[in-house]
Amino acid sequence: MEIKICIGSSCHLKGSEKIVELFQKKIAENNLDAEISLAGSFCTGQCNRIGVTVIVDNESHTGITPENFETFFSEQVMPKLKGAN
């Protein structure tokens, strides 16, 4: 699975660095290093008023914040990993 986090100017100002840290922590906690490729992406052109844009296997998700990260990870990342196994 490939996950790209927008680190463009707008998303940077909205906390993309924190989202990267949260992903790194979740990947390590769940021993998913071999299953998830985490990368940064310049502006995806999908700026949102709130949160960061995250692309999971070419599917864009906008508005990701530290507050909704856990829900996003459990609903959008984990099911796709389980489906791939």
Image: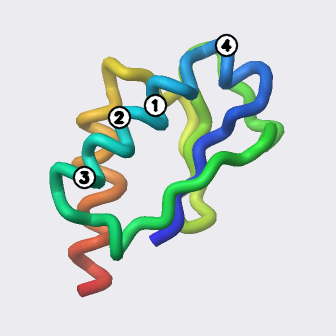
| Residues tagged 1 and 2 counted as in contact (Cβ below 8 A) | yes
Mark 4 vs mark 1, CA separation in Å: 12 Å
What amino acid does circle 2 point to?
Answer: Leu
Indicate which disc residue 13 carries.
Answer: 4
Q: Which residue is mark 1?
A: 19
- Mark 3 is surrounded, within 10 Å at the Cα level, by few (under 14), some (14 to 19) or many (20 or more) other residues, namely few
Q: Which residue is mark 3?
A: 28
| Residues tagged 3 and 1 counted as in contact (Cβ below 8 A) | no
| 3 relative position to 6: left or right | left
Picture quadrant of residue 21: top left
Give the secondary structure at mark 1: helix
Give the secondary structure at mark 3: helix
Residue 49 horizontal/vertical position (percent):
65, 14
| 4 relative position to 35: left or right | right
Picture quadrant of residue 78: bottom left
Mark 3 vs mark 1, CA separation in Å: 14 Å
Indicate which disc residue 22 carries.
Answer: 2
What amino acid does circle 4 point to?
Answer: Leu
Q: Earlier in the sequence, mark 4 or mark 1?
A: 4
What amino acid does circle 1 point to?
Answer: Ile
Mark 4 vs mark 3, CA separation in Å: 25 Å
- Mark 2 is surrounded, within 10 Å at the Cα level, by few (under 14), some (14 to 19) or many (20 or more) other residues, namely some
